[in-house]
Amino acid sequence: MLTDRQGNALPGATAETLALYNRAIDAFNIYRGDPIAPLDQAIEAAPDFTMARIARAYLFALVAEPAAAVAAKADLATVKESRLDDREASHVAALALLLAGEWSAAGLALDRHNLRYPHDLLALQAGHLIDFYRANARNLRDRLARVLPRWSPDMPGRSIAQGMYAFGLEETGDYTRAEETGRQALDQQPLDCWAHHAVAHVMEMQGRAQDGIGWMTAREPYWSGDDNLFKVHNWWHRALCHLDLGQTQEVLALYDGPIRQERSAVALDMIDASALLWRLTLTGQDVGERWQELATAWDQHADGTFYPFNDWHAVMAYLGAGRDDRVEALLTTLRATRDQSETATWARRIGLPLVEGFVAFWRSDYTTATELLHPVRFIANTFGGSHAQRDIIDWTLTEAALRGGNRDLAEGLAHERLALKPHSPINRDFLRRATAPAKEELKIA
Protein backbone atom coordinates (compact mmCIF):
# COMPACT_ATOMS: atom_id res chain seq x y z
CA MET A 1 0.00 0.00 0.00
CA LEU A 2 1.19 3.51 -0.78
CA THR A 3 2.04 5.87 2.07
CA ASP A 4 2.60 9.57 2.59
CA ARG A 5 6.09 10.95 3.20
CA GLN A 6 5.87 10.18 6.91
CA GLY A 7 4.87 6.55 6.36
CA ASN A 8 1.11 6.78 6.99
CA ALA A 9 -0.98 4.40 4.86
CA LEU A 10 -3.12 5.92 2.09
CA PRO A 11 -5.76 3.36 1.04
CA GLY A 12 -7.12 3.93 -2.44
CA ALA A 13 -4.20 6.07 -3.62
CA THR A 14 -2.41 5.51 -6.90
CA ALA A 15 1.03 6.67 -7.89
CA GLU A 16 -0.53 9.59 -9.74
CA THR A 17 -2.91 10.61 -6.95
CA LEU A 18 -0.22 10.19 -4.29
CA ALA A 19 1.82 12.86 -6.04
CA LEU A 20 -1.21 15.15 -6.10
CA TYR A 21 -1.92 14.48 -2.42
CA ASN A 22 1.66 15.24 -1.43
CA ARG A 23 1.53 18.49 -3.39
CA ALA A 24 -1.67 19.48 -1.55
CA ILE A 25 -0.29 18.65 1.90
CA ASP A 26 2.92 20.54 1.13
CA ALA A 27 0.86 23.59 0.14
CA PHE A 28 -1.22 23.30 3.31
CA ASN A 29 1.86 23.02 5.51
CA ILE A 30 3.58 26.14 4.19
CA TYR A 31 0.36 28.02 3.31
CA ARG A 32 1.63 28.61 -0.18
CA GLY A 33 -0.10 27.60 -3.40
CA ASP A 34 -3.50 26.01 -3.93
CA PRO A 35 -4.02 22.81 -1.94
CA ILE A 36 -7.60 22.31 -3.14
CA ALA A 37 -6.97 21.87 -6.87
CA PRO A 38 -4.65 18.85 -6.55
CA LEU A 39 -7.06 17.24 -4.10
CA ASP A 40 -9.93 17.79 -6.54
CA GLN A 41 -7.86 16.06 -9.22
CA ALA A 42 -6.91 13.21 -6.93
CA ILE A 43 -10.52 12.59 -5.89
CA GLU A 44 -11.69 12.65 -9.49
CA ALA A 45 -8.99 10.18 -10.56
CA ALA A 46 -9.38 7.91 -7.52
CA PRO A 47 -12.81 8.28 -5.86
CA ASP A 48 -11.87 5.67 -3.23
CA PHE A 49 -8.84 7.69 -2.08
CA THR A 50 -10.47 8.60 1.22
CA MET A 51 -7.63 10.59 2.78
CA ALA A 52 -7.72 13.01 -0.16
CA ARG A 53 -11.36 13.74 0.60
CA ILE A 54 -10.65 13.99 4.34
CA ALA A 55 -7.86 16.48 3.67
CA ARG A 56 -10.18 18.58 1.50
CA ALA A 57 -12.84 18.53 4.21
CA TYR A 58 -10.32 19.85 6.75
CA LEU A 59 -9.26 22.63 4.40
CA PHE A 60 -12.86 23.76 3.92
CA ALA A 61 -13.76 23.40 7.60
CA LEU A 62 -10.74 25.33 8.83
CA VAL A 63 -11.44 28.39 6.69
CA ALA A 64 -14.06 29.22 9.36
CA GLU A 65 -16.57 30.54 6.85
CA PRO A 66 -20.19 29.32 6.53
CA ALA A 67 -20.12 28.51 2.80
CA ALA A 68 -16.90 26.52 3.08
CA ALA A 69 -18.36 24.54 5.98
CA VAL A 70 -21.18 23.38 3.69
CA ALA A 71 -18.61 21.94 1.28
CA ALA A 72 -16.76 20.26 4.16
CA LYS A 73 -19.97 18.63 5.37
CA ALA A 74 -20.61 17.25 1.88
CA ASP A 75 -17.17 15.61 1.84
CA LEU A 76 -17.70 14.26 5.34
CA ALA A 77 -21.03 12.70 4.37
CA THR A 78 -19.39 10.95 1.41
CA VAL A 79 -16.50 9.66 3.50
CA LYS A 80 -18.84 8.23 6.13
CA GLU A 81 -20.22 5.87 3.47
CA SER A 82 -16.76 4.42 2.83
CA ARG A 83 -14.96 1.54 4.49
CA LEU A 84 -12.45 3.25 6.78
CA ASP A 85 -9.28 2.08 8.45
CA ASP A 86 -8.55 3.19 12.02
CA ARG A 87 -6.67 6.37 11.07
CA GLU A 88 -9.33 7.47 8.60
CA ALA A 89 -12.13 6.76 11.10
CA SER A 90 -10.29 8.81 13.71
CA HIS A 91 -10.06 11.75 11.32
CA VAL A 92 -13.77 11.45 10.47
CA ALA A 93 -14.72 11.55 14.14
CA ALA A 94 -12.69 14.74 14.66
CA LEU A 95 -14.15 16.35 11.55
CA ALA A 96 -17.71 15.58 12.64
CA LEU A 97 -17.13 17.34 15.96
CA LEU A 98 -15.48 20.31 14.27
CA LEU A 99 -18.35 20.77 11.81
CA ALA A 100 -20.85 20.56 14.68
CA GLY A 101 -19.21 23.64 16.21
CA GLU A 102 -17.48 21.63 18.94
CA TRP A 103 -13.97 22.97 18.47
CA SER A 104 -12.55 21.84 21.80
CA ALA A 105 -13.94 18.33 21.45
CA ALA A 106 -12.46 18.15 17.94
CA GLY A 107 -9.12 19.34 19.28
CA LEU A 108 -9.22 16.70 22.00
CA ALA A 109 -10.07 14.01 19.45
CA LEU A 110 -7.01 15.04 17.45
CA ASP A 111 -4.93 15.01 20.65
CA ARG A 112 -5.70 11.31 20.95
CA HIS A 113 -5.21 10.81 17.23
CA ASN A 114 -1.79 12.48 17.30
CA LEU A 115 -0.66 10.18 20.11
CA ARG A 116 -1.58 7.12 18.05
CA TYR A 117 -0.26 8.59 14.81
CA PRO A 118 2.51 11.01 15.83
CA HIS A 119 3.78 11.37 12.26
CA ASP A 120 0.40 12.34 10.79
CA LEU A 121 1.32 15.83 9.65
CA LEU A 122 -2.17 16.57 8.32
CA ALA A 123 -3.60 15.85 11.77
CA LEU A 124 -0.94 17.98 13.47
CA GLN A 125 -1.59 20.94 11.16
CA ALA A 126 -5.37 20.63 11.52
CA GLY A 127 -5.08 20.30 15.29
CA HIS A 128 -2.76 23.30 15.43
CA LEU A 129 -5.32 25.42 13.59
CA ILE A 130 -8.11 24.22 15.85
CA ASP A 131 -6.01 25.18 18.87
CA PHE A 132 -5.47 28.60 17.29
CA TYR A 133 -9.17 29.13 16.56
CA ARG A 134 -10.08 28.29 20.15
CA ALA A 135 -7.06 30.23 21.47
CA ASN A 136 -5.70 27.27 23.43
CA ALA A 137 -2.15 28.53 23.96
CA ARG A 138 -1.09 25.55 26.04
CA ASN A 139 -2.14 23.02 23.45
CA LEU A 140 -0.59 25.05 20.63
CA ARG A 141 2.64 24.25 22.41
CA ASP A 142 1.97 20.83 23.90
CA ARG A 143 0.34 19.17 20.88
CA LEU A 144 3.79 19.37 19.28
CA ALA A 145 5.77 18.79 22.47
CA ARG A 146 4.04 15.43 22.89
CA VAL A 147 5.08 14.12 19.48
CA LEU A 148 8.29 15.87 18.38
CA PRO A 149 10.54 13.46 20.32
CA ARG A 150 9.14 10.70 18.11
CA TRP A 151 10.27 12.48 14.92
CA SER A 152 13.77 11.62 13.78
CA PRO A 153 15.88 14.58 12.62
CA ASP A 154 15.79 13.39 9.02
CA MET A 155 12.06 12.64 8.80
CA PRO A 156 10.41 14.69 6.03
CA GLY A 157 8.32 17.52 7.46
CA ARG A 158 10.01 17.71 10.85
CA SER A 159 10.81 21.39 10.37
CA ILE A 160 7.11 22.03 9.75
CA ALA A 161 6.31 20.50 13.13
CA GLN A 162 9.05 22.66 14.66
CA GLY A 163 7.51 25.78 13.11
CA MET A 164 4.15 25.02 14.72
CA TYR A 165 5.92 24.33 18.01
CA ALA A 166 7.62 27.73 17.80
CA PHE A 167 4.26 29.46 17.62
CA GLY A 168 2.99 27.48 20.61
CA LEU A 169 6.08 28.48 22.59
CA GLU A 170 5.43 32.13 21.72
CA GLU A 171 1.77 32.02 22.75
CA THR A 172 2.77 30.54 26.12
CA GLY A 173 5.30 33.32 26.69
CA ASP A 174 8.49 31.30 26.15
CA TYR A 175 9.85 33.95 23.83
CA THR A 176 13.53 33.00 23.77
CA ARG A 177 12.86 29.36 22.87
CA ALA A 178 10.13 30.40 20.43
CA GLU A 179 12.50 32.62 18.47
CA GLU A 180 15.29 30.03 18.51
CA THR A 181 12.95 27.24 17.39
CA GLY A 182 11.36 29.38 14.70
CA ARG A 183 14.72 30.38 13.25
CA GLN A 184 15.90 26.76 13.30
CA ALA A 185 12.78 25.65 11.43
CA LEU A 186 13.33 28.36 8.83
CA ASP A 187 16.89 27.19 8.29
CA GLN A 188 15.36 23.92 7.09
CA GLN A 189 12.35 25.36 5.24
CA PRO A 190 12.54 29.13 4.56
CA LEU A 191 8.92 29.18 3.38
CA ASP A 192 7.47 27.88 6.67
CA CYS A 193 4.74 30.36 7.55
CA TRP A 194 4.19 29.27 11.16
CA ALA A 195 7.91 29.57 11.93
CA HIS A 196 8.18 33.02 10.36
CA HIS A 197 4.94 34.05 12.04
CA ALA A 198 6.16 32.83 15.44
CA VAL A 199 9.26 35.02 15.29
CA ALA A 200 7.16 38.01 14.19
CA HIS A 201 4.87 37.44 17.18
CA VAL A 202 7.82 37.29 19.56
CA MET A 203 8.96 40.71 18.38
CA GLU A 204 5.42 42.08 18.64
CA MET A 205 4.93 40.77 22.17
CA GLN A 206 8.32 42.04 23.32
CA GLY A 207 7.73 45.49 21.83
CA ARG A 208 10.65 45.13 19.40
CA ALA A 209 9.01 47.16 16.66
CA GLN A 210 12.20 48.09 14.82
CA ASP A 211 13.38 44.49 14.94
CA GLY A 212 9.98 43.43 13.66
CA ILE A 213 10.17 45.75 10.66
CA GLY A 214 13.68 44.52 9.91
CA TRP A 215 12.60 40.88 10.20
CA MET A 216 9.60 41.32 7.93
CA THR A 217 11.56 43.39 5.40
CA ALA A 218 14.51 41.01 5.18
CA ARG A 219 12.27 37.97 4.73
CA GLU A 220 9.65 39.59 2.50
CA PRO A 221 10.45 37.42 -0.56
CA TYR A 222 9.52 34.32 1.45
CA TRP A 223 6.11 35.46 2.72
CA SER A 224 4.73 38.09 0.34
CA GLY A 225 4.10 36.10 -2.84
CA ASP A 226 0.70 36.16 -4.48
CA ASP A 227 0.19 32.49 -3.67
CA ASN A 228 0.97 32.87 0.04
CA LEU A 229 -2.18 32.55 2.16
CA PHE A 230 -0.46 34.30 5.10
CA LYS A 231 0.63 37.33 3.11
CA VAL A 232 -2.10 39.74 4.31
CA HIS A 233 -1.60 38.67 7.92
CA ASN A 234 2.14 39.18 7.58
CA TRP A 235 1.63 42.66 6.16
CA TRP A 236 -0.68 43.28 9.13
CA HIS A 237 2.16 42.32 11.47
CA ARG A 238 4.47 44.78 9.78
CA ALA A 239 1.76 47.45 10.04
CA LEU A 240 1.48 46.82 13.80
CA CYS A 241 5.19 47.53 14.15
CA HIS A 242 4.83 50.85 12.35
CA LEU A 243 1.72 51.68 14.41
CA ASP A 244 3.56 51.03 17.66
CA LEU A 245 6.17 53.55 16.52
CA GLY A 246 3.47 56.12 15.73
CA GLN A 247 4.07 55.87 11.98
CA THR A 248 0.42 56.05 10.97
CA GLN A 249 1.01 57.17 7.40
CA GLU A 250 3.06 54.04 6.77
CA VAL A 251 0.21 52.00 8.26
CA LEU A 252 -2.36 53.62 5.98
CA ALA A 253 -0.12 53.00 2.99
CA LEU A 254 0.14 49.32 3.91
CA TYR A 255 -3.63 49.10 4.37
CA ASP A 256 -4.34 50.68 0.99
CA GLY A 257 -1.61 48.59 -0.60
CA PRO A 258 -0.91 44.94 0.16
CA ILE A 259 -3.43 44.53 3.00
CA ARG A 260 -6.58 45.62 1.17
CA GLN A 261 -5.79 46.44 -2.44
CA GLU A 262 -7.05 43.04 -3.64
CA ARG A 263 -10.36 43.42 -1.76
CA SER A 264 -9.97 39.93 -0.32
CA ALA A 265 -13.22 38.23 0.66
CA VAL A 266 -11.39 35.74 2.90
CA ALA A 267 -12.56 36.16 6.49
CA LEU A 268 -9.05 35.85 7.95
CA ASP A 269 -7.88 38.76 5.78
CA MET A 270 -10.91 40.87 6.66
CA ILE A 271 -10.30 40.28 10.37
CA ASP A 272 -6.89 41.90 9.95
CA ALA A 273 -8.37 44.78 7.98
CA SER A 274 -11.07 45.50 10.56
CA ALA A 275 -8.65 45.31 13.45
CA LEU A 276 -6.17 47.63 11.75
CA LEU A 277 -8.75 50.28 10.86
CA TRP A 278 -10.09 50.14 14.43
CA ARG A 279 -6.60 50.64 15.86
CA LEU A 280 -5.97 53.54 13.51
CA THR A 281 -9.25 55.12 14.58
CA LEU A 282 -8.24 54.76 18.23
CA THR A 283 -5.11 56.79 17.49
CA GLY A 284 -7.27 59.59 16.09
CA GLN A 285 -6.81 58.84 12.40
CA ASP A 286 -9.67 59.51 9.99
CA VAL A 287 -9.76 56.40 7.78
CA GLY A 288 -12.45 57.86 5.54
CA GLU A 289 -14.40 55.59 3.21
CA ARG A 290 -12.26 52.54 3.88
CA TRP A 291 -14.86 51.26 6.31
CA GLN A 292 -17.57 51.13 3.64
CA GLU A 293 -15.74 48.78 1.30
CA LEU A 294 -14.79 46.47 4.14
CA ALA A 295 -18.29 46.42 5.62
CA THR A 296 -19.76 45.34 2.30
CA ALA A 297 -17.23 42.52 2.08
CA TRP A 298 -18.31 41.29 5.53
CA ASP A 299 -21.96 40.89 4.48
CA GLN A 300 -21.41 37.39 3.07
CA HIS A 301 -19.66 36.12 6.21
CA ALA A 302 -21.12 37.66 9.37
CA ASP A 303 -24.25 35.79 10.40
CA GLY A 304 -24.02 35.78 14.20
CA THR A 305 -24.12 31.99 14.38
CA PHE A 306 -21.05 30.41 12.80
CA TYR A 307 -17.91 31.88 14.40
CA PRO A 308 -18.32 34.84 16.80
CA PHE A 309 -14.71 36.00 16.45
CA ASN A 310 -15.57 36.88 12.84
CA ASP A 311 -18.84 38.57 13.84
CA TRP A 312 -17.05 40.79 16.35
CA HIS A 313 -14.64 42.01 13.67
CA ALA A 314 -17.49 42.51 11.22
CA VAL A 315 -19.20 44.78 13.75
CA MET A 316 -16.10 46.99 13.85
CA ALA A 317 -16.49 47.56 10.11
CA TYR A 318 -20.27 48.06 10.32
CA LEU A 319 -19.82 50.67 13.06
CA GLY A 320 -17.17 52.49 11.05
CA ALA A 321 -19.37 52.44 7.94
CA GLY A 322 -22.47 53.64 9.81
CA ARG A 323 -24.26 50.37 9.03
CA ASP A 324 -26.37 50.41 12.18
CA ASP A 325 -28.90 48.03 10.65
CA ARG A 326 -26.26 45.31 10.37
CA VAL A 327 -24.98 46.02 13.86
CA GLU A 328 -28.46 45.65 15.34
CA ALA A 329 -29.15 42.51 13.29
CA LEU A 330 -26.01 40.83 14.62
CA LEU A 331 -26.78 41.94 18.16
CA THR A 332 -30.27 40.48 17.88
CA THR A 333 -28.91 37.17 16.63
CA LEU A 334 -26.23 36.97 19.31
CA ARG A 335 -28.74 37.79 22.06
CA ALA A 336 -31.19 35.17 20.78
CA THR A 337 -28.65 32.33 20.61
CA ARG A 338 -30.06 29.24 22.35
CA ASP A 339 -27.93 26.54 20.73
CA GLN A 340 -25.80 24.56 23.17
CA SER A 341 -22.81 24.06 20.86
CA GLU A 342 -19.44 25.41 21.90
CA THR A 343 -19.51 28.17 19.30
CA ALA A 344 -22.93 29.27 20.58
CA THR A 345 -21.52 29.39 24.11
CA TRP A 346 -18.65 31.53 22.84
CA ALA A 347 -21.18 33.84 21.23
CA ARG A 348 -23.15 34.28 24.45
CA ARG A 349 -20.28 34.54 26.94
CA ILE A 350 -17.65 36.38 24.88
CA GLY A 351 -18.88 37.51 21.48
CA LEU A 352 -21.93 39.36 22.77
CA PRO A 353 -20.22 41.43 25.50
CA LEU A 354 -17.37 42.25 23.12
CA VAL A 355 -19.78 43.44 20.44
CA GLU A 356 -21.85 45.37 22.97
CA GLY A 357 -18.71 46.89 24.46
CA PHE A 358 -17.33 47.99 21.10
CA VAL A 359 -20.74 49.38 20.10
CA ALA A 360 -20.91 51.35 23.35
CA PHE A 361 -17.40 52.69 22.77
CA TRP A 362 -18.19 53.77 19.22
CA ARG A 363 -21.31 55.55 20.43
CA SER A 364 -19.30 57.38 23.12
CA ASP A 365 -20.88 55.49 26.03
CA TYR A 366 -17.52 54.97 27.63
CA THR A 367 -18.82 53.93 31.03
CA THR A 368 -20.79 51.03 29.53
CA ALA A 369 -17.88 50.11 27.29
CA THR A 370 -15.58 49.94 30.30
CA GLU A 371 -18.05 47.85 32.32
CA LEU A 372 -18.41 45.35 29.49
CA LEU A 373 -14.82 45.11 28.26
CA HIS A 374 -13.04 44.97 31.62
CA PRO A 375 -14.33 41.51 32.64
CA VAL A 376 -14.55 39.93 29.18
CA ARG A 377 -10.88 40.52 28.43
CA PHE A 378 -10.01 37.84 30.99
CA ILE A 379 -11.95 35.13 29.15
CA ALA A 380 -11.58 36.30 25.53
CA ASN A 381 -8.57 34.00 25.16
CA THR A 382 -10.97 31.04 25.09
CA PHE A 383 -12.67 31.85 21.80
CA GLY A 384 -10.11 32.69 19.18
CA GLY A 385 -7.09 34.54 17.91
CA SER A 386 -3.63 35.23 19.25
CA HIS A 387 -2.50 37.49 22.08
CA ALA A 388 -1.54 40.09 19.49
CA GLN A 389 -5.00 39.99 17.90
CA ARG A 390 -6.85 40.19 21.22
CA ASP A 391 -4.78 43.17 22.37
CA ILE A 392 -7.37 45.32 20.63
CA ILE A 393 -9.69 44.62 23.58
CA ASP A 394 -7.27 46.04 26.16
CA TRP A 395 -6.40 48.95 23.89
CA THR A 396 -10.07 49.85 23.45
CA LEU A 397 -10.72 49.43 27.18
CA THR A 398 -7.84 51.75 28.05
CA GLU A 399 -9.10 54.34 25.59
CA ALA A 400 -12.62 54.03 27.01
CA ALA A 401 -11.31 54.58 30.53
CA LEU A 402 -9.44 57.69 29.40
CA ARG A 403 -12.33 59.17 27.46
CA GLY A 404 -14.81 58.28 30.20
CA GLY A 405 -12.76 60.00 32.89
CA ASN A 406 -11.93 56.82 34.80
CA ARG A 407 -8.41 57.99 35.52
CA ASP A 408 -7.60 55.33 38.12
CA LEU A 409 -8.41 52.51 35.71
CA ALA A 410 -6.70 54.28 32.81
CA GLU A 411 -3.50 54.75 34.81
CA GLY A 412 -3.56 51.17 36.04
CA LEU A 413 -4.07 49.81 32.53
CA ALA A 414 -1.28 52.04 31.20
CA HIS A 415 1.10 50.67 33.82
CA GLU A 416 -0.04 47.14 32.94
CA ARG A 417 0.72 47.71 29.28
CA LEU A 418 4.07 49.39 29.98
CA ALA A 419 5.15 46.43 32.11
CA LEU A 420 4.93 44.33 28.94
CA LYS A 421 6.10 46.94 26.42
CA PRO A 422 7.99 49.66 28.27
CA HIS A 423 9.25 51.37 25.12
CA SER A 424 5.94 51.56 23.25
CA PRO A 425 5.08 55.17 22.35
CA ILE A 426 1.38 54.27 22.43
CA ASN A 427 1.63 52.86 25.95
CA ARG A 428 3.71 55.80 27.18
CA ASP A 429 1.08 58.14 25.76
CA PHE A 430 -1.65 56.25 27.62
CA LEU A 431 0.18 56.97 30.88
CA ARG A 432 0.78 60.60 29.95
CA ARG A 433 -2.90 61.12 29.27
CA ALA A 434 -3.99 59.25 32.39
CA THR A 435 -1.81 61.40 34.65
CA ALA A 436 -2.11 64.72 32.81
CA PRO A 437 -4.16 67.64 34.09
CA ALA A 438 -7.84 67.20 33.31
CA LYS A 439 -7.91 69.61 30.37
CA GLU A 440 -5.26 67.54 28.55
CA GLU A 441 -6.37 64.01 29.33
CA LEU A 442 -8.38 63.38 26.16
CA LYS A 443 -5.72 64.58 23.78
CA ILE A 444 -4.59 61.79 21.47
CA ALA A 445 -0.97 61.91 20.31
Image (cartoon, rainbow, N blue to C red):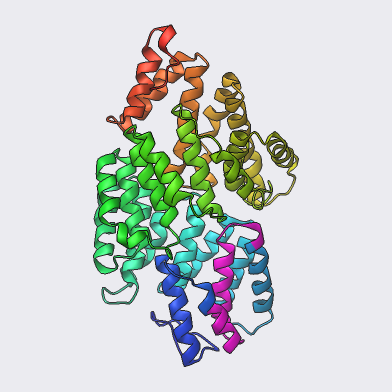
Horizontal side of 128 relative to 343 (left or right) equals left
Horizontal side of 315 relative to 140 (left or right) equals right
Horizontal side of 434 relative to 366 (left or right) equals left
Looking at the picture, how far across and down is residue 65, in whole percent? 61, 57
Q: Chief secondary structure of the magenta span?
A: helix
Task: Please determine whether, in this image, residue 363 is positioned above or below residue 118.
Answer: above
Specify the quadrant of the image occupied by residue 435.
top left
235 or 344, nearer to the observer: 235
Range of residues picked out in magenta = 39-67
Q: Residue at x 57, y 23 (%)?
A: 371
Q: Residue at x 67, y 52 (%)?
A: 341
* Residue 1 seen in the current view: no
146 or 227, nearer to the observer: 227
Is 42 in the magenta?
yes
Is 237 in the magenta?
no
Task: Please determine whether, in this image, residue 38 is positioned above or below residue 223.
Answer: below
